[in-house]
Amino acid sequence: MQHAAFRKNPPLESSHSVLSGGFAAALLQAPAALFDRLSTWQHQAEERAHLLSLTDHQLRDMGLTRDAVEDMARKPIWTR
């Protein structure tokens, strides 16, 4: 039997070890990251819409002003 250092052909890597590398791992994680980002944006849009539906009295109870809520609602979805 040959010693591992003298083998002509190195053993084939399993698909798991090939996919665990940097680029491949990032590629596999991209759909989940995209879903998380879209989910966050949807949640923010729902929160902003809910704040807009509140009365001025309710907003004051939370320490917010109508102007602040309207400014926040005008921001693009990718900002906080």
Image: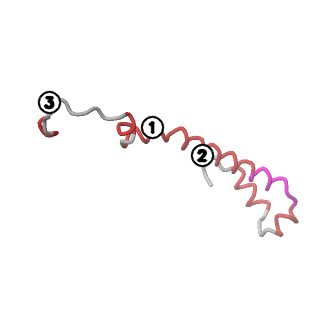
Q: Quadrant of residue 72?
A: bottom right
Image quarter where the C terminus lies is: bottom right
Which of the two marks, 2 or 3, is nearer to us in this view?
3
Q: Which residue is mark 3?
A: 8
Q: What crowding class fits label 2: few (fewer than 14 Cα within 10 Å), some (14-19), or many (20 or more)?
A: few
Q: Give the SS element for disc 2.
A: helix
Quick one: SS at disc 1? helix
Question: Could you give the CA–CA distance between mark 2 and mark 3, rounded to whole angstroms?
Answer: 46 Å
Determine whether 62 is above or below 11 in the image: below
Q: Which residue is mark 1?
A: 27
Relative image position of residue 77 (x, y in whole percent): 64, 46
Earlier-in-chain disc, 2 versus 1: 1
Tell which circle, 1 or 3, labels the residue nearer the N-terminal end.
Answer: 3
Residue 44 numbered tag: none
Please indicate whether residue 65 sits to the left or right of residue 4 in the image.
Answer: right
- Of pointers 2 and 3, the one earlier in the residue sequence: 3
Mark whose residue sits in front, 1 or 3: 3
Report the residue at 77% width, 66% height from top: 64
Residue range in magenta is: 47-55
Q: Amino acid at mark 1?
A: Leu
In the image, is residue 39 part of the stretch drawn in magenta? no
Residue lying at 84% horizontally and 53% vertically, measured from the top left: 53
Most extreme residue toward the front, as rendered? 1
